[in-house]
Image: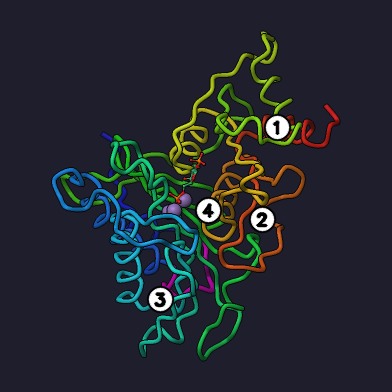
Amino acid sequence: MTKTITLGQFIIERQADFPYAKGELSRLLRDIGIAAKIVNREVNKAGLMDILGQAGSTNIQGESQQKLDVYADQQFIAALKSGGECCIVASEENEEIIRLDSDISKNAKYIVAIDPLDGSSNIDVNVPVGTIFSIYRRRTASGPATLHDVLQKGTEQVAAGYIIYGSSTMLVYTTGKGVNGFTLDPSIGEFCLSHPNLKIPETGTLYSINEGNYVHFPQGVKDYIKYCQVEDAATRRPYASRYIGSMVADIHRNLIKGGIFIYPVTSSAPNGKLRLVYECNPMAFIIEQAGGKATNGSSRILDLDVYELHQRAPIFIGSKAMVSVAEQFMQNTY
Ligand code: AHG
Ligand code: MN
Ligand code: MN
Ligand code: MN
């Protein structure tokens, strides 16, 4: 029987990795874990609660907000507010940054960017959804933090992680020293270490892309999809197509099994659909820390300039060898 290590115990044990931190990051991760358990409780019984369906509002993305989008957003903001370790929350569900300016929060040194509920289109049909978070240290030393503190390159992230509310609920995160996965044990209400030192396979046989947009894809993407489908025993093709419509679930599966996830530009999404600050950058940090690769088809995601809170970016992310081949098709050098 292996020893049970809870998320809290793990964070404290790893405290030594951060001589400069005096426990604030640990407490911030704990606050996120608490909100994740609350959201998980609602996701797990969504069908029994008045929490399915649309909230009747539209977010800055022009998406009709699902009740669970709004609920998850509120829970994570509340947990971060009460925890006091975060001075600004940047959320998919809020057009502007949310400044937490209570006496304990206004001088806090961390910024949290969050996609409170990823894969909203899957909520009512019981398909896995998730939460994605990204943590930065503020750039200004004190006083009211501003958007300037939020718009930082992905390389500046202090930590990033996701929760996947699936057949089991997992929290996967990195602080720049590898990736570790924790599974929620409902009998004790704790996230317990279940996937230590996660590494993505160097290559794989799964490709994830919404082929419904095929006619609108750049030629390089069309050529790569054809490449995935051609018989070639040496490279274990044809690959299998797996696309859930929840970024977290698609990327989590590929992290475990090996694979590539692509959301390229399309005619209706000239900069791609996924948001750089709270979807692409955190997932890129995690996958790179697990030994994978994440680019926009030519440039490293984490190096992209961040100039707008809800900025979008094309993304090719997953097993290093697969992303490299896809990039060659994008650059027409394959
Ligand atoms: P969100 O629910 O946070 O708005 O994100 C949805 C995203 C992402 O989770 C998923 O990979 C993608 O939208 C699916 O988009 P399509 O339905 O256009 O394929
Ligand atoms: Mn959305
Ligand atoms: Mn999302
Ligand atoms: Mn979302």
Q: Residue at x 59, y 24 (%)?
A: 204
Nearer the observer: mark 1 or 3; the answer is: 1
Question: Compared to 141, does 184 lie above or below?
Answer: above
User: As rendered, which of 269 and 94 lies closer to the eye?
Assistant: 269
Mark 2 residue type: Leu
Q: Percent position (x, y) of residue 267?
A: 66, 43
- The residue beneath circle 3 is 85
Calculate the distance from the C-alpha at mark 1 to the C-alpha at mark 3: 42 Å
User: As rendered, which of 224 and 95 lies closer to the eye?
Assistant: 95
Calculate the distance from the C-alpha at mark 4 to the C-alpha at mark 2: 12 Å
- The residue beneath circle 2 is 302
Calculate the distance from the C-alpha at mark 3 to the C-alpha at mark 2: 24 Å
Q: Residues within 10 Å of mark 3 (few under 14, many from 20)?
A: many
Question: Compared to 266, does 206 lie above or below?
Answer: above
Predominant secondary structure in magenta?
Answer: loop
For mark 3, give the secondary structure. Answer: loop
For mark 4, give the secondary structure. Answer: helix
- The residue beneath circle 4 is 279
